[in-house]
Amino acid sequence: MKGFGGGLQQMMKQANQMQNKMKKLQEELKEREFEASSGGGAVTVKVNGDNMVLAIKIDEEVMKDDAEMLQDLVMTATNEAIKTAKDVSSKEMEKITGGFNMPGMF
């Protein structure tokens, strides 16, 4: 039984280290910025890793067109920027966890 306890302790230590790495990565990812555009660059949206919109750039020519098209371009660019942020976050987290799914952690 002594060997089992030591193995369990080591496993708990590794899990704790992984959790600490994950927390650190989550904080780092919140600071990263992700950008996407739509309409051939007519609309560009920048978000952070916390999925907060940081900036929206709209080409002046697009503002002269109809509002519905502009709304669609902003929505498309925003959704793509958020998707990119999530994809990068997932890939970075997978590097730490080795693909091991830890519900509630990320």
Image: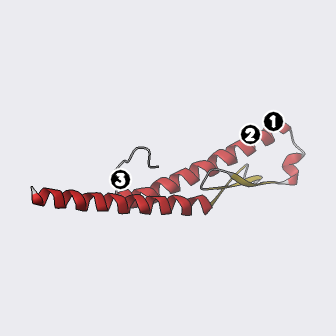
Q: Residues within 10 Å of mark 1 (few under 14, many from 20)?
A: few
Q: Nearer the viewer, residue 36 or 88?
A: 88
Q: Nearer the viewer, residue 38 or 17?
A: 17
Q: In the image, what residue type sits under mark 2? A: Asp
Look at the numbered disc 3 and give the secondary structure of its residue.
loop
Q: How many marks?
A: 3
Write down the residue under mark 2: 72
Which residue corresponds to the image point at 33% horizontal and 57% vertical from the top-left? 15
Mark toward the viewer: 1 or 3:
3
Which mark is drawn over residue 68? 1
Measuring from the top left, give residue 49's x and y in whole percent.
59, 56
Q: Residue furthest right?
A: 64
CB contact under 8 Å: marks 1 and 2:
yes
**Image quadrant where residue 76 sits:** top right
Q: Is residue 32 visible?
A: no
Which residue corresponds to the image point at 36% horizontal and 63% vertical from the top-left? 17
Which numbered disc flags the more N-terminal residue, 1 or 3?
A: 1
Q: Is residue 56 visible?
A: yes
> Distance between the Cα atoms at labels 1 and 2?
6 Å
> Distance between the Cα atoms at labels 1 and 3?
41 Å
Mark toward the viewer: 2 or 3:
3
Q: Nearer the viewer, residue 98 or 22?
A: 22
Measuring from the top left, give residue 73's x and y in whole percent.
74, 44
Write down the residue under mark 3: 99
Which residue corresponds to the image point at 25% horizontal and 58% vertical from the top-left? 11
Q: In the image, what residue type sits under mark 1? A: Glu
Which residue corresponds to the image point at 36% horizontal and 47% vertical from the top-left? 101
Measuring from the top left, give residue 41's x and y in whole percent.
74, 55
Which mark is drawn over residue 50? none
Q: In the image, what residue type sits under mark 3? A: Gly
